[in-house]
Image: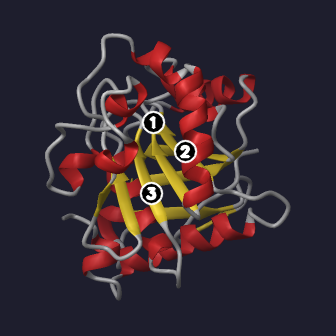
């Protein structure tokens, strides 16, 4: 597994994820955040890596049960992060071919389970927008303390906008020196149009000169007066 927050919990990278976790917990004061979706503007911004590490960080909290749901029905990747097959998953549950208990897999990380995609469907958007998907989310949120949904890039397909309607909070991931600023603004607007509760933005792949975080550093701070810390910053 490439879950650094688990394999090397004393590393600067792990500390960065704990900082993001703290920011999410502070966002939880007035609203119960159980379903958290992470999306990006474009592919290959590190979404699956970030969500896997972040979920592992939440699972490290005492007596917490956490689920990672791969919501990218077009290009699944969570199974790759955990080195398992993608033979069955959420699509099997929604089509009634398998019971959810047969598809959810436990991981080596205590308290952390994953639900893969399974067979890639011909109609991802329709499946995500179905009543069965809504009912499924209602069921798992009663069993888990946190459910992290790895959604497709919001700037590419409508799937993320659909999933955001099930989420209590949304995080937009931005690849440093990769994501076009105007494209990122458009992604934010698309989420706002469907009423998504945007918690903030994680700037991934930020390399600060002389920083111990290196390539995997994160950038945190007020959007007007940013400061170099690791974590999540609020979108304004």
Q: Which mark is residue 181?
A: none
Instruction: Describe the element under mark 2 as helix, strand or loop.
Output: strand
Residue 60, above or below 216: below
Task: Identify the residue at image location x=65%, y=64%.
Answer: 24
Q: How dense is the environment of label 1, judged by Cα within 10 Å: few (below 14), some, or many (20 and up)?
A: many
- Indicate which disc, 3 or 1, sits on the residue closer to the N terminus: 3
- The front one of 78 and 155 is 78
The answer to whether the residue labelled 3 contacts the one labelled 1, judged by CB atoms less than 8 Å apart, is: no
Does 225 sit left or right of 210 as displayed? right
Give the CA separation, mark 2 to mark 1: 7 Å
Earlier sequence position, callout 2 versus callout 1 = 2
Q: Residues within 10 Å of mark 3 (few under 14, many from 20)?
A: many
Pointer 3: what residue? 67
Q: Residue at x 52, y 81 (%)?
A: 61
CB contact under 8 Å: marks 2 and 3: no
What residue is at 71 percent from the left and 24 percent from the top? Answer: 194
- In the picture, the quarter occupied by the N terminus is bottom left
- What label does residue 151 carry, if any? 1
Q: Furthest-bottom residue in view?
A: 10
Foreground pick, 41 / 224: 41
Visible residue check, residue 44:
yes
For discs 3 and 1, the disc positioned in front in the rendered view:
3
Instruction: Identify the residue under disc 2.
Output: 37
Query: So how many labels did they put on this image?
Result: 3
Q: Could you say whether the residue bearing mark 3 is in a helix, strand or loop?
A: strand
Tell me how far mark 3 sits from mark 1, CA to CA.
14 Å
Which element carries disc 1, helix, strand or loop? loop
Mark 2 nearby-residue class (10 Å; few <14, some 14–19, many ≥20): many
Pick the quarter of the image with the C terminus. top right
Q: Is residue 228 visible?
A: no
Give the vertical position of 19 relative to 189 (above or below).
below
């Amino acid at each position: 597994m490439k879950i650094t927050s688990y394999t090397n919990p004393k590393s600067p990278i792990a500390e960065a994820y704990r900082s993001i976790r703290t920011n999410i917990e502070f966002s939880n004061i007035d609203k119960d955040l159980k379903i958290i979706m992470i999306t990006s503007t474009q592919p290959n911004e590190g979404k699956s890596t970030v969500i896997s590490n972040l979920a592992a960080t939440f699972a490290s909290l005492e007596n917490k049960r956490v689920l990672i749901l791969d919501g990218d029905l077009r290009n699944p990747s969570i199974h790759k992060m955990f080195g398992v097959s993608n033979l069955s998953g959420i699509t099997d549950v929604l089509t009634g071919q398998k019971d959810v208990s047969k598809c959810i897999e436990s991981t080596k990380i205590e308290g952390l389970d994953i639900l893969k995609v399974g067979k890639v469907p011909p109609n991802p958007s329709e499946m995500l927008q179905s009543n069965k998907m809504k009912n499924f989310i209602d069921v798992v949120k009663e069993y888990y303390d946190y459910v992290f949904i790895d959604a497709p890039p919001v700037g590419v397909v409508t799937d993320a906008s659909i999933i955001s309607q099930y989420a209590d909070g949304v995080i937009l991931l931005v690849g440093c020196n990769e994501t076009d600023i105007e494209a990122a603004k458009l992604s934010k607007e698309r989420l706002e149009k469907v009423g998504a509760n945007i918690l903030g933005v994680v700037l991934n792949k930020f390399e600060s000169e002389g920083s111990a975080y290196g390539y995997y550093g994160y950038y945190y701070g007020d959007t007007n007066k940013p400061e170099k810390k690791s974590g999540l910053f609020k979108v304004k």
